[in-house]
Image (spheres, coloured by chain):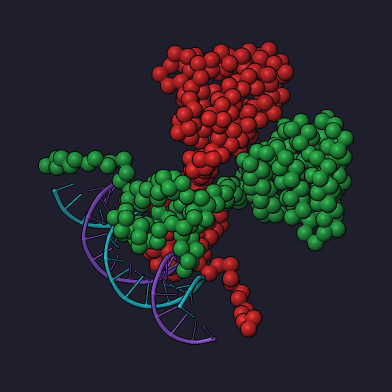
Chain colours: A green, B red, C purple, D cyan
Amino acid sequence: MPEVVSNERVGRSLLREEVSERIKRYILDNRLRPGAPLPTENELCAALGASRSSVREAIKTLDALDIVEVRHGHGTYVGGLSLSALVEGLTFRGLLSPDDEFGVLSDLVEVRELFERGNAAGIVTALDAEHLASLDALVDRMDTGDDPLAADRAFHALLVHPLGNELVSQLTDAFWDVYTTVAPHLGLPTDEHDTVALHRDIITAARANDLDSFATAVAAHYAPIRLRITAARAA
Amino acid sequence: MPEVVSNERVGRSLLREEVSERIKRYILDNRLRPGAPLPTENELCAALGASRSSVREAIKTLDALDIVEVRHGHGTYVGGLSLSALVEGLTFRGLLSPDDEFGVLSDLVEVRELFERGNAAGIVTALDAEHLASLDALVDRMDTGDDPLAADRAFHALLVHPLGNELVSQLTDAFWDVYTTVAPHLGLPTDEHDTVALHRDIITAARANDLDSFATAVAAHYAPIRLRITAARAA
DNA sequence: GTGGATTTGTGCGTATGTATG
DNA sequence: CCATACATACGCACAAATCCA
């Protein structure tokens, strides 16, 4: 018996996928902003005609992508739409691949360098006196502060910030987070002794409006990092 | 009353998160490769001492990040560790922000262009005759083939492929996917009439080993796209 | 600060759909 | 066609967190 079932919704055989799509639709159709409250789980169950298990699993999927944010005992809200999923995914990939895990870090550093060196013209022209002073302060914190790593992260974030490209800024932060998480697991140091001087050279070149010097200083900043990765890969 | 609670495990109050971490640990400790089978849900419940609900929700979180992959009626496996989460997250962000949704696409195109223009030297030197011939064939498919969009995607993927940077290749694909998904929702065309000629110019410059011409050709390729975005933003 | 209401988190039993042999 | 193994879905009960009167 062929049992001719008129399946009009074959493409969506998994209910929780359907629920997930409809929650996204709800956010889009209502133009909700990050932080805006979503219906409760029970309300979603009633509205979407699904059990609480399906609704909850769908919400967990969206939560992993930072499309929604769940606060225990409080409610569910539109998420921050950050790149946290990229960070977690790349970090895991870096920790997993034992054979070419250095390739992951190497690729990562190359992109970070490209963001700064390839945008040299835009960065140098957009950096004003205030930015440069802030960069100086961050290098000081790198040198004598109690959290040099945080200062390093802020330095590179501030460096690309004047570009006005939100995606570049967020990717810069994301890649920095992945690197500092994965590197220690491979015997790579997250702090370099000559880091302070190399960062000062970048500021000096930017202050002098010298594009070539800026590109050179950025390359010099990443050179020891790439070198250590290559050295570690050999061992 | 300050209520001095000696909380030694504040960071891990949610069982679901704990389960998720332990599943990732299991994969890392056993050096499992993508596609390798994971224990069944019941086995995970027994091993981790958690209920099925918690285990399933944890798995859905990892599934969203492509760290695990679930096949209905078959089992759970290590995922492909792709950037699918980035694609879904950025796509949703692009569809959501009605005010600066053009900013999202604009940022995206800027990064795509940076990948190709900023790596001009590496691309031109790494492209051999075989690559160039493949690029020619892809432009032909763009011109007369039945799926010009797929040829366009493959063109840019092949362009950055000889760099040997897996991350750049995957980000190129990811950003292309996001753009072609979001653009139609904003009245932006995904195909340009002069696309074919602009792509041929890129190949010509690469074949001539002319870095400046290559950079210029890449810029000319993205110029109309950026123009359309700017024009659409004004309206 | 106490209690109660709301909301998410966890556990468990059962039935169903799916893939394999 | 049947049997087995597995994921999917549902419903309910209770625990934990948060908020507010």
- Is A156 drawn above or below residue A116 in the view shown? below
Q: Which residue is at 56% across, 32% downward?
A: B233
Is D20 on the left or on the right of A175, as rendered? left
Residue B97 coordinates in the image, percent (x, y) = 52, 42
Residue A219 coordinates in the image, percent (x, y) = 79, 36
Residue A60 shows in the view: yes
Foreground residue, B125 or A204?
A204
Q: Which residue is at 46% across, 20% downward?
A: B148
Which quadrant of the view contains residue B59? bottom left
Foreground residue, B153 or A202?
A202
Which quadrant of the view contains residue B229? top right
Is B4 on the left or on the right of A15, as rendered? right
Which quadrant does the N terminus of chain A fall into? top left
Q: Which residue is at 37% across, 48% downward?
A: A22
Q: Which residue is at 45% across, 52% downward?
A: A61
Residue A105 coordinates in the image, percent (x, y) = 67, 44
- Is B185 drawn above or below residue A143 in the view shown? above
Which quadrant of the view contains residue B56? bottom left
- Is A43 drawn above or below residue B227 in the view shown? below
Residue B30 coordinates in the image, percent (x, y) = 53, 55
Residue B84 shows in the view: no
